[in-house]
Structures are given as structure tokens and as C-alpha cells.
């Protein structure tokens, strides 16, 4: 009896001891180890969706009931399009409206863009290997996927250059935590030259041409639109200069590509745009339209609340229309865009409701619960490209064609075309007239601030606006001020703490 | 025939030789009352012995007249009796004044007498537990042991709390709690246990005691031993009590008149409703009166125990019905426990079966108990039609929220534990344990349409189901042998393995067809909140312990444990833990014999050892692709931004413990002091990665925290006469935790407020130092070196110039402080400008308080006069600050409608010259004058002393109750949280915190003051 119990105990002990290694091996039950992924076309598609979802989260928001996206903070909020919504604005939005950015501003955080870049890096590195595991991962499928990853990476780095200037460059995924994670920033000129431009060129060379794209993804035309934007960029300090010829080439390529409705954009007349009556289709149902190039998808049933800080969310909006918008633009009764873009009533609850992305006109009167709107933020559309094209043509001395494209937009908006003799479209004023047209056409499309920076008009446009806001607060009316470093954003505080090799942008601490 | 005779002779010789005989007897105490449960054993025999029954009777077969019987029972002095030729042995056991003979549980079958213990342990027994009428283990343990800080959330009927043994030794939010070992089974908590079923709770505080639990022992170990049956006829115990509770600390709220005056002044006489004829708008509610009510807590329990011929059993069932002080805040709980033991010769088996069910409604504290300060007091909570009003001025109706929001838990725990042991030799026993447990937590939430803004929105709800299954197996040998008369060796060697699996499902719904149905068929499923997840983990361990005792004078002990865990990477699955300890009972030395009349027993202890903390994510070694984000109908995959670290290991705590135990006057007074230093290294730490890498964080082992502490425990019986006794037990703890080292020396801020830096303490608030409010615009004036200047005004009130702090006129340069780019004026808050650059910004934050107590104590006094006993329990803590976030948020004036606290309403700055601490409300936070969450104005002293419980008990005379066929009966009056001394201004300074975000009161369930009566019957 004793012996048998001994034996049993010993056997049990030994068995347990040897079985331990296996017994102690527990694989994650909800995730796949990274080295077991990228083995099929399904994996590729999931990885691409992951890239878009990451970008969507960064631009529109994370679906929580807060205002978490940066689309408006970066593109609109620092401009004369929006003002902070008084006591309801977050501290971050007050800083945006008053040009008093600090390193604590929530939108000064580039983490989400680098998360997206990290996913692009994974995709670029590992998508090709899927071809050897899955016959469905054809060369075309792999190349189309890679093209989207390259284009998204180019766009993210371009956004970082536009917002912060110099960028930290990562083009390989970071997977081994024993390797250094901290790197210094690379000069923005080199970032453009070594990453942004090569990536967008590579994307164009890889994408399958002449296909009908999905409007929610980066297709052939979207690559060209990003390329044109990159070529048009001029940094505030003049170190990055525009290449209008290249921009025109990109736009020519874009005109040759197909839209999501299967029609070639062509880009030869106003008829290639959505009709006047269908202008809002660009925002409400861009898929299958004539004009839409790339919009960010949203589905509240799976993504949650879009909660844009200028439309509607769970709490009071952080931003409202700048007083110049309601004062000037609203008077233009023939402009069909006014009532379709903003709530034309005044006062609390109206002057903060952007209607562009909502199926509403004139006034916010939703019977949809606030958290259940699908809002598709526009990245690029043909109307935007027409005005960019007009700008490039104007800059290269082709005033006639610049006017032609400008008028396509005006006429579509229900406004009279400018006569060639109109002083507004003289050689001296053309750039400003295009800029103003862009303001109204692309109001709330994340473009205005970058337009002001690119055209070097931040001071002239923002000085009077900021002085008025400063007067309201009782602070010295210095306007935008003379410190042009303030055009760039500060780097977010914790981002600096996490990477000791970063140096804060000048004029910020 | 001759053969037959021979056989008879042989047989008779054989029987004569063995001379085995039966002995029986009765055991009584000094007063002649029978003592049940006394262990009776034949010395130096492998057989299990027996225990006395309820009448004190025992019966046992002994080998012969030379046999010596040992009698032992907790609280009594051991006794030995030679059997001789007696067959009936009646014994008187004397009560032990000292607790030196108490048995201390040290894990894996190990037991030690308190006098022989080498480590730092504390014991709480059934008697001490009973005095506190505890509903949870947190109630039972609070204040009972030095070095054990219990933070009790007992206002909330479902509230538990936190237990921290010997200070915060980790910066890992998940891993601060102790390990629970319940009847030998390693458990995550003791929630399902009813304190009334507990025999003893042993708390292992130092590494030498806890090292036998290796990688899970770093935060201390709580060993719970539940009650076992005693021999004899069934003994049935009934207990019932009913407590009435009230809001313990009602707060002064802002009245309707005060709020009207405030809004009138703020908004230039607009913005408040002046319709004096509308009854809906002319109330003056103190919502506390509407939301809080008298609580009724009823607890009924029955236990049956008994045994005989090798069998013993204990069964207990407790039913708790707690209708708390907030409307619709309640729980019902059933806890049951069956312990059955059977001994047959060398073989014994024990089965423990537990079943617990708890259901209750969790009220939304933020929308009810906190909301009472947010809604304007003049609006009725009812609409004219008698229904409850919804939002008013964006503020919820706290009463409707409490009444109609449903958040119902139904939690079940079933546990089955079998322990088999076999006495291989006289000195060696093998035990194996198998435990299986199923924990099933479900939750149903439903928020009706009437609670939405306007009362017409969508009803929302969810159904959640969580299941955890775990099993554990242990096998160990216990060896115990005495060599000669002086050398005793005890040893333990064994293994254990366990495995856990958790599955979690939650489905959320909206747009219900009908509000009567809460299942998913009646609503639209909300995909953003619907998900299922799962995890699993496993552990395997080997352990050993050796104890050597020389003549009760010198005691040495060593333990080793080797732990394997699935949480760590392939090359780091195993870790080793060890400890050594020694004790010297110096009073046993001959040269100390002269002290025995006064110093009855004295012992010096030293121990050191290493324990671990494995509380990291279950899969922290893996870098994974995560799913779950959606884009245009496709599920996205992305690399998880928390990267895996395949060299991750547990954090280890090395500690040194120095202790002395003194026992005076035959144990009437005992005194213990422990001093410890505890160094936790390789802190499990979520290290932030450079965000540009695409990753966000990785768990690493880096940094260290040093804890030091001093613990005093005194027990004594100052008075002991025939009719009157007075027992005291008290403990006092001093502790300090400092961060020694962090990754690359880098500090970080946890939860936006708590600065974690080298040399700092856990719980440090990193905030701006508020220096008051500028009375005049001219008050913001400093000289060249930033010394404050005093503005001078003439008789007409005109500003004439400045004087410096010596009173002399000052005409030099004037510096002014700026915040948010604005020069601060009268009515703005003045802040400490740490770097003297004239700008108040992030760089001016200072350590403005600390949320961890540095000292805490508990004192229990028991007075007995004849049949009456009175227990008074006081506990308290000192040295901690509380950030009163509720008060701060009320005063932040961010919403147009939130009423500030009444004193801010009355005394905030309004005009030049006002001296106050509250800034000018009209400027809101434009100049950072409120700085919610970072304003030292809202840091308060969190020290308190609480009259925690009082219990007055009357025991009926046995003669009296025997007439009604009862063995015993008593009635008692009980009071809980009767008095409190504190300077803290909000509901209560005691509330639990999670992880590193310590000491912030963001609106807690208020505590109650309770009184009630109970009755206890035995038959």
C-alpha cells in the first residue's frame, strides 16, 4: 500500500514535470501571433481594412461619444472657417481658435498617424509573402494592396510634414522590442524627397489602371489626387516648394482614371461634376457618383458615433462657424451650397451645426438620434481637384484655363460665371479668388488651413479674425503675430516624453 | 487437545501482549462546562485520534497502559495524561491566558504553534470575527492586523474594498492585492465566503511566510480556514440580525435662493426662472432627502455541525438581504458551505463544497448619488402629471435615475474541493487536493426611454455573461519527527498545478420594441458594444519547506519554490523563490529563567526571502495581430500597439523582517514589534514606446520600489476578575513606500495626476499650488526676484503704489504672472510660479499631496460582566490626502447650470478687494483659475478615526435556556460606523482606489451609519 502510493506520487510528479512545458503553453485566444498572419488574400484584405480603420479613427474619431477625430482640427479649425464654441469648447479647441497652441493640445498628437504608418509598414513588408501561401493572392491583388499601403503611407507622412514639419521616418515595422524605438526627426525636405514622393510614385506604378474603384478606398484617382496635393505643397518657410508641372501631370492622370460610378473622370467640363441638384451626393452617398474620388467610410452600427465636433455628438459642439461665415456667405442667396452646408439660423444650437455631411438643409432638425448619423468625410473629389487645377494653371500662367475650371465650380454652385474681364479674375487677384472659392466649395472638408499655409496667406487672412477674437477675450489684439513658427504645430507633450530624441518645434515648449 | 491449549495460550498471550483497550471520558473547562472539539491523540501514534463531542465526551482505543493521551484545543493549555489502568479519564483543560499555543496555519498542511513561528504572520479567529458582525471579509479583517490596510467600500451593498499588505509594492495596477488561499486552494478573492463560516484567517506578511506561494506571494497571502464539525450530537446555531442604516454624513447643498442669487449676479439678472407662480419651478429640494432613505440590512444564518466515529461535518447557510440607503440599491446573497471530513485509521478525506449566489441592483452613482449636487434645487422631480421628470437644464433627475435604471447582477460561484491524506508512517503524511470551481457572473442592464434627454430617446440595455472555470491539483508530503528529546524536524515537499479559462459574452441593445423585455430579440443589437472574448492561463509549481526546532529555543526554517507560468515567454517560464528565517526564544535559556514571573515568553525573529508578482496580461509575451475594427463592412486587422516581450518575467520582492514577540504575566499582556524593508525589483511596468515606431507600449521589467514599515501589536487583559474582564487588542502601523528606480530614470504621470518618479512616493498628486485669489487687479505684482508686492490704496480706494514685504514703498520693476497668455487680474487664482518665469504652465506643477496613508491603527476593547459583553472597535488612518474632485467639478462652472458648492456661491470673488479662495465665476476657466483636477485648493486631509463598531451582547444563563431545550441563547445590539472624526468635507474619507490613481474622490457611494439588533440561538 505504502509502496504503491509512493509510486503513484512519484509517477504523478514526473509526469507533471515533463508535461509542464506543454501545459504552460497558452496561446492567445482572441488574437493571432503576428508571425502567423499575412498568409492569404483574406489576411491581406483584413490588413488593408486595418489601415483604413486606423486612418478613419484618426480623422473621424474612435466611435466613442467624445469628439476624438482630427480632420477638422488640422484642416479647418485653425482657419477663419470655425471659431470655438465658447464655454462648451474644450481647452484644445480654444487654443485652435485663438492661435495659442500648447504641447498639451490633444490634436498635436501624431500617434494615430504613426499607428497608421506602422500598419502600412507591416503590410508593405509582409503582403508579398502571402502569394506563396495562397493562390488567390495574385500578383495583381498583391500589387493593388501594396499600392494602397504605399499611398496611405505617403499621405500620412505628408500630413505630418504639413502639420509639424520634420518627421521621424519609419519605413519598416517595429516588432523587436530589444531594438531601439527612439529616433530623431528627419528634415522635412528630405522626408518629402525620400519617403513621400517615392511612395506616391510607387503607389501609382503598382495600382491596376482603368478600374472602377471603391470610393472608400484609395484607387488610381485618389493616388493622383494625393500626388497633386503633394506637388502643390509649399511650406511656410519656403523650404518645400511647389512643382506645378508635376501637379498638372498628376491631375492629367487623374482625369484619365475612373470614378466609382465606372465613368472616366475626363475633367473637361462642368458636366463631369455632380449636377447642381446633386451637389450633396458627394457627401451623402459618394459611392457610384461622378465626382467623388475618396471618402472616409462610416457605419454607426459598427463604428459607433461619428461625433464630429462641428456637426452633432453626445454633448455640445466644440466649434461654431466663424462670424465671417454667417455674416458674408449667408447673404449669397443664389449659392446653393450655403443652406446645404451650414445651419443658417443664428444662435446657440444653430451656429455650430455643419449640415454638409448630414441629410439636412437650412436648419438642423434631425429626427435621427444624434449618435446615429453616418458621416462620410471627404478626402478628395473632382470639385476640389478642379480648383487645385485652376490654381496650378494660374501659377503657370494659363489664366484662361484657370478661369474655365473656376467657373465650372461657380456655375455648378448656382453662381454667375466670372467674365474674363472681371477684376476678381485678373492676374493679380486670381489666386485669391480661387482661394475664396475653395473656402466655400470645400468648407468643412479639411482643406482651408492648408490652403492658407500653401498660399502664404495665413497672416493676411487670420490677423483680422484673430484680433476680433482677442478683443472678445480682453487680451491684447496682436492678430496672428509675427512668429511664423506658430504655423507649425507643437509636438504633443507625452510624445516628446516617450522619444527623448525628439526636439520640440521652435516657439513651443 | 494440547495443540488447542497451546493455541489458547498463544492467543491469550497475544491479546495480553497487545493489551489494547478502550478509554472514554469527559473534558471540561475550569468552570465545569464541557469543551467540544478538543483533539485527543495517543502520543507517538500514527492513528488520527478523535475529538470531543458537544458534551465534552470522547472515546478512544489506546495501545496499553503506557500510552499517553495528548489533549489540545485552541485557547486552552495543552495537557498530557498517562492512561495507566484507567478506562475513564475525566480531564479539566485550563484556558490559556496567552495565545502562544494557538496554531498558526503556514500553508500546504503546515501548522506551527504561535510560540514557534518564525515569520511575520497575524491571525484573526472566529471569536474576533463574530464581534464585528461582518457581512464581508473586508468588514471582518479591517483594523484587525498590523500592516494590513483594508479600505472598505461598505456603504454600497455590493461594495467590497481593497486589501494591501505591507504597503504598495508595485506600479502595476492589476497586481496589488494579496493571494487568497481558502482551505488550501489558491483563489483570486474571498467574495463568496461568509465570514461566519470561518474558523481562522491567517495573514502571511513577510517573504519568509509567503515564499511558499512563490510567484504569487509578493503582496502577502491570506489563508482562510473554514469551520469543521466537532464530534458528538449535532449542534445547531441560528443567528439573525437586522440593522437600520442612514446616510452617515449629510452634506449642506446649495439652496434655491442661493442659486438664484448666484445666477442673477452672474448673468446680469437673466438666466434663472423667475416665474414665482409655477409650482414645478418653485421647489427647494435637498435631493439627499429624496434619494436617500433608511436602509434595512437583514442577515440570517443557520449552521449545523457535528460528527462521530471518524466523521465530522459542518454546514452553514447565510442569507443576506440588504436594502441600502439609496433608493433601489439592494443586494440579496446566499452563501453556503458544507465541510465533511472522514477519518478511517491512516486515511482521511475532507470534502468542501461551497455555493454562493448574489443578486442586486447597482445604482449609477454618478447619475444619482453625485447628481444630487448637479440639478438645480428649485425644479420638482415630478412632472405635473405625477411622473418623474427627465433632464432639466441638461441635468438628470437623480431619483428617477436610481429608480428606473436597472443594472442587475446575478453571480454564482460553485466550488468543490477534495483533500485526501494518508499517513504513510508515524512521521510522514501524503496529502493530495483537487479543487474545481465555476464562477458565473451575469449582468442585465436596462435604461428606459424615460431617462433619456427629453424622455423620448431610445431605451438601451445589455446582457452580459461571464464564466470562469478553474481547477487546481496539489500533492504534498508532510514530515514531522522528533529526534531525542530536543530536536524536532518538520518538512513539506510537493507540487501543484492549476489552469484557468475565462469566457465573456456581452450583447448590447437599443431601440427596444417593448420596455418589458430585455433580451436581444426585442431590441436592435448594438454592434459597437457587443463582443465575446476569452483567456486562459496555467501555472505549475514545486515547493518545499524545512523547519528545525531545537528544544523550543532555536527555530530555523527554509522554503523553496519553483514556479512556472504560462504568462511568461518560452525561455522565462520558470522562476525560483526562497526564504530563510530564524527565531530565538531567549526566555527558554537558563540564564533568563529568573524573568519568567514577569517576562513569560520572549522571542526574536529574523527572516528574509524572495517572492513574486505575476500580475501581467495573460499573453504579454506575444506580439499579435488584433481584430475588431471595422471599415466598410470588412473586419480590420492591425498589429496590436502593445507589443509582446518574450523576455518578460515576474517582479520579485525581497524582504527583510526583524521581529520581537514578548509575552508578560503568563500571557496576560503580549507585545509584538516588526520592522521590515521590502525591495520590489524588476517592476512589471508598461513602458511607453516612442509613438513613431507605430507601437504604443510594451510590458517590461524595470525599476524598483522600497517599502519600509514598523508594526506594533498589543494584546492584553488589564482586568480579569470572577465577574468582570477587560480585553484589549490594538495594532499600529507606520509605512512608507518610495520609488527607487524607474526605466532610464524617466518619470511618468499616471492617470494625468499621479507623478511616478524616482525618489517619489506612490500616490503623489502632481498639481498646481493654489495661493489664493488676487483681491485687486493690482495684487498681481512681484518685484524683480518674484517676491510678492502689496498694493496700497488711499482712503478713497485709489491705488497709490506698492510696498514690499518689509512694508517699505517699492518703485522698481513690476513683474506680473500670466496664464494662458493672459495677465492675471483681481478674481483670478494666484498660482505658485515654480520656475519664476512669469508664466504658469505645466512646468509649475508640484507635489501637492499624497493619497496613501502613512499610519493606521485598530483598537478592539471587549468588556465582560457576568452575562453581558461589550465590544468596541475603533480604527483610523493618518497622513493621506484626498483630492476632492466632486467639489472641484461643482465649482468649475463649465456648465451653465451646475450649481457651485454653497460656500463658493456665497463667497466667490465679485468685485475689487474681495478676499476669498474662490475665483470670479464669470471668467469660468479662461485663465485657468479653476484648473479642474490640478488645483491644490481641493486637496483635503484624509485622516480619520472611526468608531467602527459597537456590539453589546447578553447571554442568557444556561439554566434558563435549557428549560426551553436550548443549549445557549444570546441577544445583541450592534452599531456600525457610529462616529467619525475627520476634517474631510465630503461624504467619507475612506474609499478604495484602483491602481496608481490613489485618493481621488470623484463621487463615491456614501457610507451609512447603522444600528440594529440580533439574536443567536444554539440547540
Image (spheres, grey):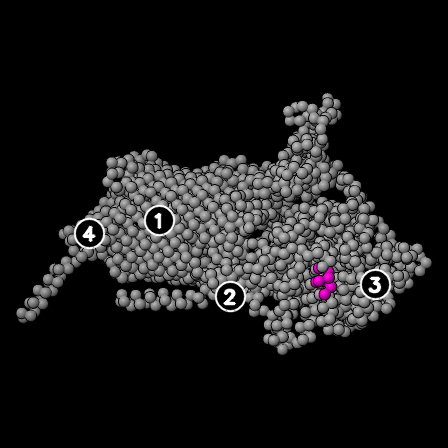
Q: How far apart are the alpha carbons under marks 2 and 1?
A: 39 Å
| Same chain assignment for discs 4 and 1 | yes
Please identify the residue farthest to the right as the structure is shown: A421
Q: Residue at x 28, y 59 (%)?
A: B428
Relative side of B181 to A170, left or right: left
* Residue position marked by numbered label 4 in the rendering: B68
* Residue position marked by numbered label 3 in the rendering: A389
Q: Closer to the camera, A375 or B487?
A: B487
Q: Residue at x 70, y 50 (%)?
A: A505
**Would you identify the image quadrant in which residue A292 lies?**
bottom right
Percent x, y of residue A489? 71, 51
* Residue position marked by numbered label 1 in the rendering: B581
| Same chain assignment for discs 3 and 2 | yes
Percent x, y of residue B169? 48, 48
Q: Residue at x 24, y 53 (%)?
A: B482
Comparing marks 2 and 1, which lies closer to the viewer? 1
First-in-chain label (4 vs 1): 4
| Same chain assignment for discs 1 and 3 | no
Comparing marks 3 and 4, which lies closer to the viewer? 3
Comparing marks 4 and 1, which lies closer to the viewer? 1
Q: Which residues are magenta?
A: A191-198
**Mark 2–mark 1 contact, CB under 8 Å?**
no
**Would you identify the image quadrant in which residue B780 lies?**
top right
Q: How far apart are the alpha carbons under marks 3 and 2?
A: 54 Å
Q: Quadrant of the N terminus of chain B?
A: bottom left
Relative side of B655 to B917, left or right: left
Mark 1 nearby-residue class (10 Å; few <14, some 14–19, many ≥20): many
Amino acid at each position: 500500500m505504502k509502496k504503491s502510493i509512493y509510486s503513484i506520487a512519484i509517477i504523478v510528479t514526473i509526469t507533471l514535470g515533463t508535461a509542464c512545458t506543454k501545459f504552460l503553453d497558452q496561446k492567445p485566444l482572441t488574437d493571432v501571433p503576428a508571425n502567423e498572419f499575412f498568409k492569404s488574400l483574406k489576411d491581406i484584405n483584413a490588413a488593408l481594412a486595418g489601415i483604413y480603420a486606423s486612418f478613419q479613427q484618426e480623422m473621424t474619431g474612435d466611435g466613442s461619444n467624445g469628439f476624438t477625430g482630427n480632420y477638422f482640427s488640422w484642416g479647418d479649425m485653425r482657419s477663419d472657417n470655425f471659431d470655438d464654441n465658447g464655454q462648451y469648447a474644450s481647452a484644445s479647441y480654444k487654443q485652435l481658435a485663438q492661435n495659442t497652441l500648447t504641447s498639451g493640445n490633444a490634436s498635436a498628437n501624431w500617434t494615430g498617424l504613426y499607428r497608421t504608418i506602422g500598419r502600412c509598414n507591416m503590410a508593405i513588408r509582409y503582403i508579398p509573402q502571402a502569394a506563396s501561401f495562397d493562390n488567390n493572392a495574385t500578383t495583381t491583388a498583391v500589387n493593388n494592396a501594396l499600392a494602397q499601403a504605399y499611398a496611405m503611407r505617403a499621405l500620412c507622412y505628408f500630413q505630418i510634414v504639413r502639420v509639424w514639419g520634420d518627421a521621424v521616418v519609419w519605413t519598416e515595422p517595429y516588432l523587436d522590442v530589444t531594438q531601439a524605438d527612439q529616433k530623431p526627426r528627419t528634415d522635412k525636405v528630405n522626408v518629402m524627397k525620400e519617403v513621400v514622393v517615392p511612395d506616391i510614385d510607387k503607389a501609382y506604378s503598382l495600382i491596376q489602371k482603368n478600374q472602377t474603384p471603391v470610393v472608400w478606398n484609395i484607387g488610381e484617382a485618389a493616388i493622383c489626387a494625393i500626388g497633386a496635393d503633394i506637388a502643390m505643397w509649399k511650406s511656410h518657410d519656403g523650404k518645400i516648394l511647389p512643382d506645378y508641372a508635376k501637379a498638372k501631370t498628376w491631375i492629367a492622370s487623374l482625369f484619365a482614371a475612373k470614378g466609382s460610378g465606372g465613368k472616366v473622370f475626363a475633367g473637361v467640363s462642368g458636366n463631369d461634376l455632380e449636377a447642381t441638384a446633386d451637389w450633396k451626393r458627394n457627401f451623402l452617398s459618394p459611392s457610384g457618383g461622378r465626382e467623388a474620388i475618396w471618402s472616409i467610410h462610416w457605419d454607426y452600427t459598427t463604428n459607433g458615433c461619428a461625433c464630429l465636433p462641428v456637426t452633432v455628438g453626445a454633448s455640445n459642439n466644440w466649434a461654431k462657424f466663424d462670424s465671417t461665415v454667417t455674416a458674408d456667405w449667408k447673404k449669397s442667396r443664389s449659392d446653393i451650397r450655403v443652406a446645404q452646408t451650414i445651419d443658417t439660423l443664428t444662435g446657440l444650437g444653430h451656429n455650430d451645426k455643419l449640415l454638409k455631411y448630414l441629410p439636412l438643409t437650412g436648419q438642423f432638425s434631425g429626427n435621427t438620434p444624434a449618435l446615429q448619423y453616418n458621416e462620410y468625410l471627404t478626402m478628395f473629389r473632382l470639385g476640389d481637384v478642379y480648383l487645385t487645377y485652376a490654381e496650378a494653371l494660374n501659377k503657370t500662367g494659363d489664366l484662361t484655363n484657370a478661369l474655365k475650371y473656376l467657373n465650372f465650380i461657380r456655375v455648378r454652385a448656382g453662381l454667375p460665371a466670372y467674365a474674363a474681364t472681371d477684376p476678381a479674375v485678373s492676374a493679380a487677384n486670381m489666386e485669391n479668388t480661387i482661394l475664396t472659392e475653395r473656402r466655400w466649395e470645400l468648407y468643412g472638408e479639411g482643406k482651408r488651413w492648408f490652403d492658407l499655409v500653401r498660399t502664404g496667406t495665413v497672416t493676411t487672412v487670420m490677423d483680422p479674425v484673430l484680433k476680433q477674437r482677442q478683443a472678445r477675450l480682453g487680451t491684447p489684439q496682436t492678430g496672428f503675430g509675427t512668429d511664423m513658427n506658430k504655423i507649425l504645430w507643437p509636438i504633443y507633450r507625452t510624445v516628446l516624453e516617450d522619444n527623448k530624441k525628439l526636439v520640440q518645434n521652435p516657439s513651443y515648449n | 487437545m494440547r495443540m488447542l491449549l497451546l493455541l489458547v495460550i498463544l492467543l491469550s498471550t497475544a491479546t495480553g501482549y497487545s493489551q489494547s483497550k478502550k478509554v472514554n471520558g469527559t473534558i471540561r473547562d475550569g468552570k465545569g462546562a464541557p469543551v467540544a472539539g478538543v483533539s485527543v491523540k495517543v502520543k507517538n501514534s500514527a492513528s488520527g485520534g478523535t475529538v470531543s463531542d458537544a458534551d465534552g465526551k470522547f472515546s478512544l482505543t489506546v495501545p496499553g497502559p503506557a500510552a499517553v493521551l495528548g489533549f489540545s484545543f485552541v485557547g486552552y493549555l495543552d495537557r498530557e495524561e498517562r492512561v495507566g489502568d484507567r478506562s475513564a479519564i475525566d480531564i479539566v483543560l485550563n484556558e490559556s491566558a496567552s495565545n502562544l499555543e494557538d496554531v498558526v496555519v503556514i500553508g500546504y498542511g503546515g501548522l506551527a504553534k504561535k510560540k514557534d513561528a518564525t515569520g511575520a504572520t497575524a491571525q484573526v479567529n472566529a471569536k474576533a470575527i463574530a464581534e464585528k458582525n461582518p457581512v464581508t471579509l473586508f468588514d471582518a479583517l479591517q483594523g484587525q492586523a498590523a500592516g494590513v490596510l483594508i479600505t472598505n467600500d461598505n456603504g454600497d451593498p455590493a461594495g467590497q474594498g481593497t486589501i494591501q499588505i505591507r504597503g504598495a509594492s508595485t506600479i502595476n495596477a492589476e497586481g496589488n492585492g494579496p493571494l487568497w488561499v481558502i482551505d488550501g486552494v489558491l483563489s483570486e478573492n474571498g467574495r463568496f465566503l461568509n465570514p461566519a463560516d470561518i474558523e481562522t484567517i491567517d495573514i502571511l506578511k513577510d517573504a519568509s511566510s509567503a515564499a511558499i506561494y512563490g510567484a504569487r506571494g509578493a503582496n502577502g497571502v491570506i489563508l482562510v480556514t473554514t469551520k469543521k464539525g466537532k464530534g458528538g450530537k449535532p449542534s445547531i446555531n441560528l443567528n439573525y440580525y437586522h440593522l437600520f442604516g442612514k446616510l452617515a454624513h449629510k452634506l449642506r447643498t446649495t439652496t434655491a435662493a442661493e442659486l438664484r442669487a448666484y445666477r442673477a449676479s452672474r448673468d446680469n439678472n437673466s438666466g434663472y426662472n423667475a416665474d414665482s407662480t409655477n409650482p414645478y419651478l418653485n421647489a427647494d429640494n435637498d435631493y439627499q432627502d429624496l434619494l436617500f432613505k433608511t436602509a434595512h440590512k437583514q442577515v440570517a444564518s443557520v449552521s449545523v455541525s457535528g460528527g462521530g466515529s471518524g466523521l465530522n461535518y459542518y454546514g452553514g447557510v447565510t442569507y443576506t438581504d440588504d436594502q441600502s440607503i439609496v433608493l433601489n440599491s439592494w443586494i440579496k446573497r446566499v452563501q453556503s458551505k458544507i465541510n465533511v471530513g472522514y477519518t478511517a485509521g491512516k486515511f482521511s478525506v475532507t470534502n468542501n463544497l461551497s455555493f454562493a449566489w448574489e443578486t442586486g441592483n447597482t445604482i449609477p452613482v454618478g447619475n444619482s448619488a453625485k447628481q444630487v449636487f448637479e440639478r438645480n434645487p428649485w425644479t420638482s422631480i415630478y412632472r405635473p402629471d405625477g411622473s418623474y421628470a427627465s433632464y432639466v437644464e441638461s441635468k438628470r433627475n437623480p431619483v428617477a435615475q436610481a429608480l428606473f435604471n436597472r443594472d442587475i447582477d446575478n453571480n454564482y460561484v460553485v466550488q468543490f474541493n477534495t483533500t485526501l491524506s494518508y499517513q504513510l508512517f508515524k512521521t510522514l503524511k501524503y496529502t493530495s487536493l483537487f479543487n474545481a470551481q465555476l464562477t458565473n457572473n451575469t449582468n442585465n442592464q436596462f435604461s428606459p426611454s424615460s431617462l433619456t434627454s427629453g424622455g423620448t430617446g431610445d431605451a438601451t440595455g445589455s446582457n452580459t455573461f461571464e464564466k470562469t472555470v478553474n481547477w487546481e491539483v496539489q500533492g504534498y508530503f508532510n514530515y514531522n519527527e522528533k529526534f531525542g528529546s530536543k530536536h524536532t524536524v518538520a518538512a513539506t515537499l510537493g507540487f501543484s498545478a492549476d489552469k484557468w479559462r475565462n469566457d465573456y459574452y456581452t450583447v448590447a441593445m437599443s431601440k427596444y420594441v417593448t420596455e418589458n423585455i430585455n433580451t436581444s430579440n426585442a431590441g436592435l443589437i448594438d454592434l459597437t458594444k457587443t463582443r465575446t472574448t476569452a483567456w486562459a492561463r496555467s501555472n505549475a509549481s514545486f515547493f518545499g519547506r524545512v523547519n528545525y526546532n531545537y528544544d523550543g529555543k532555536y527555530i530555523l526554517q527554509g522554503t523553496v519554490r519553483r514556479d512556472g507560468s504560462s504568462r511568461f515567454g518560452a525561455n522565462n517560464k520558470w522562476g525560483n523563490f526562497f526564504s530563510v528565517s530564524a527565531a530565538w526564544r531567549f526566555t527558554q535559556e537558563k540564564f533568563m529563567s529568573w524573568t519568567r514571573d514577569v517576562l513569560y515568553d520572549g522571542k526574536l525573529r529574523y527572516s528574509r526571502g524572495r517572492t513574486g508578482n505575476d500580475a501581467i496580461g495573460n499573453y504579454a509575451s506575444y506580439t499579435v495581430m488584433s481584430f475588431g475594427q471595422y471599415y466598410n463592412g470588412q473586419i480590420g486587422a492591425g498589429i496590436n500597439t502593445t507589443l509582446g516581450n518574450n523576455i518578460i518575467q515576474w517582479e520579485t520582492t525581497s524582504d527583510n523582517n526583524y521581529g520581537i514577540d514578548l509575552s508578560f504575566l503568563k500571557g496576560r499582556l503580549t507585545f509584538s514589534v516588526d520592522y521590515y524593508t521590502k525591495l520590489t525589483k524588476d517592476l512589471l511596468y508598461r513602458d511607453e514606446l516612442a509613438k513613431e515606431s507605430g507601437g504604443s507600449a510594451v510590458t517590461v521589467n524595470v525599476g524598483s520600489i522600497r517599502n519600509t514599515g514598523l508594526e506594533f501589536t498589543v494584546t492584553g487583559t488589564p482586568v480579569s476578575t470572577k465577574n468582570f474582564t477587560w480585553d484589549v487588542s490594538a495594532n499600529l502601523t507606520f509605512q512608507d513606500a518610495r520609488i527607487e528606480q524607474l526605466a532610464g530614470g524617466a518619470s511618468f504621470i499616471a492617470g494625468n495626476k499621479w507623478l511616478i518618479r524616482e525618489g517619489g512616493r506612490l500616490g503623489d498628486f502632481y498639481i498646481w499650488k493654489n495661493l489664493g485669489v488676487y483681491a485687486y487687479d493690482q495684487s498681481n505684482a512681484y518685484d524683480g526676484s518674484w517676491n510678492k508686492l502689496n498694493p496700497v490704496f488711499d482712503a478713497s480706494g485709489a491705488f497709490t503704489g506698492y510696498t514690499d514685504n518689509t512694508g517699505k514703498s517699492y518703485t522698481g520693476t513690476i513683474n506680473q504672472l500670466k496664464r494662458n497668455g493672459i495677465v492675471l487680474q483681481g478674481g483670478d487664482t494666484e498660482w505658485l510660479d515654480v520656475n519664476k518665469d512669469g508664466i504658469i504652465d505645466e512646468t509649475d506643477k508640484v507635489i501637492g499631496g499624497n493619497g496613501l496613508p502613512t499610519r493606521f491603527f485598530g483598537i478592539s476593547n471587549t468588556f465582560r460582566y457576568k452575562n453581558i459583553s461589550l465590544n468596541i472597535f475603533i480604527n483610523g488612518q493618518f497622513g493621506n490626502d484626498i483630492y476632492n474632485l466632486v467639489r472641484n467639478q461643482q465649482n468649475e462652472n463649465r456648465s451653465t447650470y451646475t450649481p457651485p458648492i454653497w460656500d463658493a456661491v456665497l463667497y466667490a470673488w465679485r468685485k475689487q478687494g474681495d478676499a476669498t479662495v474662490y475665483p470670479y465665476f464669470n471668467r469660468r476657466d479662461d485663465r485657468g483659475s479653476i484648473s479642474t483636477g490640478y488645483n491644490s485648493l481641493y486637496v483635503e486631509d484624509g485622516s480619520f478615526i472611526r468608531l467602527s463598531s459597537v456590539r453589546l451582547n447578553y447571554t442568557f444563563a444556561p439554566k434558563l435556556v435549557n428549560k426551553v431545550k436550548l443549549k445557549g441563547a444570546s441577544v445583541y445590539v450592534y452599531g456600525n460606523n457610529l462616529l467619525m472624526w475627520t476634517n474631510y468635507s465630503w461624504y467619507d474619507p475612506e474609499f478604495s482606489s484602483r491602481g496608481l490613481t490613489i485618493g481621488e474622490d470623484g463621487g463615491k457611494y456614501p457610507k451609512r451609519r447603522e444600528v440594529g439588533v440580533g439574536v443567536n440561538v444554539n440547540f
